[in-house]
């Protein structure tokens, strides 16, 4: 059973996670030439990409959160060399 304090903490954690992912993704759009918005990606898709990367690379969990998110996105959506 989830107590209300636990539910509020989970909501906060989820929002913080989603905020970090969208912040890194937007930064990548401007700095790395990775146009995620052009690909029509939604935040839920990016969250799943990051979750999958973290599950597949537990040895990297000591890295910073922003580094992990960036690596997950780059692995899933490599930079185009147009």
Image (cartoon, helix red, strand yellow):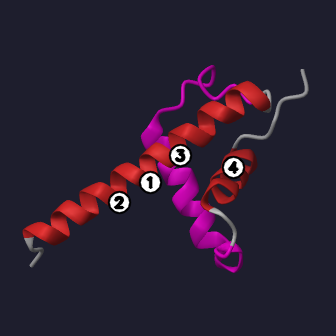
Whether residue 42 is in magenta: the answer is yes
Q: Nearer the viewer, residue 49 or 69?
A: 69
Q: Nearer the viewer, residue 76 or 34?
A: 34
Residue located beneath label 4 in the image: 70
Q: Which range is magenta? A: 34-62
Asked whether the residues under the numbered discs 2 and 1 touch, taking CB atoms below 8 Å apart as contact, a structural biologist would say yes
Q: Is residue 42 left or right of residue 30?
A: left
Asked whether the residues under the numbered discs 1 and 3 touch, taking CB atoms below 8 Å apart as contact, a structural biologist would say yes
Residue located beneath label 1 in the image: 17
Q: Residues within 10 Å of mark 4 (few under 14, many from 20)?
A: some
Identified at 35% across, 60% down, the residue is 13
Q: Residues within 10 Å of mark 3 (few under 14, many from 20)?
A: many
Q: Position of residue 14 (x, y in %)?
A: 35, 55
Q: CA distance from mark 3 to mark 2?
A: 12 Å
Query: Nearer the N terminus, badge 3 or badge 2?
Result: 2
Task: Decide: is 52 above or below 26.
Answer: below
How many marks on residues?
Answer: 4
Q: Is residue 7 left or right of residue 4?
A: right
Query: Nearer the N terminus, badge 4 or badge 3?
Result: 3
Q: CA distance from mark 1 to mark 3?
A: 6 Å
Give the SS element for disc 1. helix
Asked whether the residues under the numbered discs 1 and 4 touch, taking CB atoms below 8 Å apart as contact, a structural biologist would say no
Q: CA distance from mark 4 to mark 3?
A: 8 Å
Give the SS element for disc 4. helix
Residue located beneath label 3 in the image: 21
Residue located beneath label 2 in the image: 13
Give the SS element for disc 3. helix
């Amino acid at each position: 059973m989830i107590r209300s304090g636990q539910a509020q903490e989970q909501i906060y954690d989820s929002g913080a996670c989603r905020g970090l992912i969208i912040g890194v993704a937007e930064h990548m759009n401007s700095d790395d030439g990775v146009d995620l918005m052009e690909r029509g990606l939604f935040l839920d898709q990016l969250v799943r990409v990051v979750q999958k990367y973290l599950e597949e690379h537990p040895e990297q969990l000591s890295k910073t959160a922003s580094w992990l998110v960036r690596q997950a996105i780059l692995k899933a959506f490599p930079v185009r060399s147009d």
